[in-house]
Image: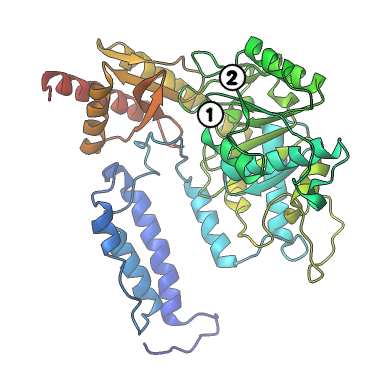
Amino acid sequence: MTKEVSTARGLTDTQARAIEGAAQAARVYREELPQMPARPTLDLDEAAGRFLGPLPEAGMPEDDVIAQIVRDASGGLHSMANPTFFGYVLGASHPVGVAADMLVSAWGQNAGSSFETPAVTGMERAVCDWVISLLSLPPDSGAGLVTGGTVANMVGVMAARNKLLSAQGWDVEADGLFGAPEIPVLIGQDAHSAPFAALRYAGLGAARVQVVETDGEGRIMPDAFRKALEQIDAPPLVVLQAGQINTGAFDPFTDLIPMVHERKGWVHVDGAFGLWLAAVPELEHRLADVQKADSWAVDLHKWLNAPFDAGMVIVRDRAPLVASMSARGAYLPETTVHWEPTDSTPELSRRARGIPSYAILRHLGVTGVRELVARHCRLAERIAATVSAESGLAVLNEIHSNQVAIACGDDGLTMRVLKRVQERGKVYPTHGEWAGRQIIRASVIGYAMTEIDADLLSAEVINAYRWCASNPE
């Protein structure tokens, strides 16, 4: 490989062509998305085989590397940014966020220090302030931008751990958990895996928690919750849910949160996607009093459609958040600002992940965020009404937000229908399990989804069901 001399711009010709080529390839990819299949056309062996093998002795010019990546990735990517992708409750990487994300990489800022990157800190502080305001959460809350819902839940749990043990005279940050007082943990039996992972990461264990009975929509039942609380004798950590992964339902915060606070406990809310309904005046009643909790986890790469990875933890009392997260070294500059990035996340070094969310929020404004969430909830209702009108198909949940759980006769038929829909590649819902049955789960969350996409999903499911019912195995 011939070494080039940098130009006055700080880039060689091949480096400049690499950046330009990547930007052009990104634009072409997004422009061609509507015509792409909804799923990869290569399997793992085919796709990975293009990249695996010994690292060559000789390198390649930068622009050739980018061209090779673009060429060899073709066919091995899922159209997750396509409005026909209804799987996994994923956002679709809004274009303005993608554009801002390019700046993040180009700027190469370590976003851990407000002293070193004041512009980044300003934008990320704005994101936190704006999201807290949109969700009507306490304005003086502490907040941190993390990788996603799992880490947001972990940070919230660790802040709760700090506060609950401090109240009992135990400094968990200094003395750890060996010999520490007990922290009872209660969680609904239909909670997502993320808070269970968070409890593991925080050293509280996933198997030792007390699981509380839920109703047919996955909501904790107040009477069962009251009985569970009566069996404990220490202030508990309680994990509630805003948006059950299959039904989109919300725990009854109005009933549950006061019971916890009467026992001087801490309420953490896993609100990865469902918490966004609090931003919509006509929908916020569905999660009434969620603002009375002590901490919240929310994804920005879900309903806000920020590029991966982007999540946010919000804690009413900033002090335990800072106590559990902050890390300082002699080489780091001392700051006196109220909002220091490293005080609210587990990382000292990280990319400026909040900038794409800043760009999206600045683009949408309050009205745009509300329209996005409300539109998706309406589309979920539209899908449910269309699908359930087909004899033999059933929607197993009430439509609380953006999730639709579809069953097609018996489990075997449901899985055959899902497989046919996915193989046709027009739309892409995913699999789930609910009410003891296999389901086709449709998550309406891509920023560009319209009635056309919702109707296409419904038609694909109905047509696949009719074909499978007429062609038994």
Residue at (80, 35) in percent of width and height: 164
Q: In the rendered image, which quarter contains the C terminus? A: top left
Q: In the visual, does 352 lie left or right of 461? A: right
Disc 1 vs disc 2: Cβ atoms closer than 8 Å? Answer: yes
Q: What residue type is labelled 1?
A: Val
Mark 1 vs mark 2: which is more N-terminal?
2
Q: Quadrant of residue 280?
A: top right
Nearest the camera: 163 or 18? 163
Residue at disc 2, secondary structure: loop
Q: Mark 2 points at which residue?
A: 283
Total numbered labels: 2
In this orientation, does residue 147 appear? yes
Rendered position, 317 above or below 116:
above
Q: What residue type is labelled 2?
A: Leu
Residue at (63, 13) in percent of width and height: 224
Circle 2 Cα neighbour tier, 10 Å, few/some/many (<14 / 14–19 / ≥20): some
Rendered position, 35 above or below 434:
below
Q: Mark 1 points at which residue?
A: 373
Residue 317: give x, y in percent of width and height. 81, 37
Residue 79: give x, y in percent of width and height. 34, 45
Tell me how far mark 1 sits from mark 2, CA to CA.
Answer: 9 Å
Rendered position, 444 above or below 114:
above
Residue at (45, 75) in percent of width and height: 16
In this orientation, does residue 379 appear? no
Rendered position, 136 above or below 359:
above
Q: In the visual, does 464 lie left or right of 327? A: left
Nearest the camera: 362 or 197? 197
Residue 145: give x, y in percent of width and height. 65, 48
In the rendered image, the residue lying farthest to the front is 179
Residue 416: give x, y in percent of width and height. 22, 28
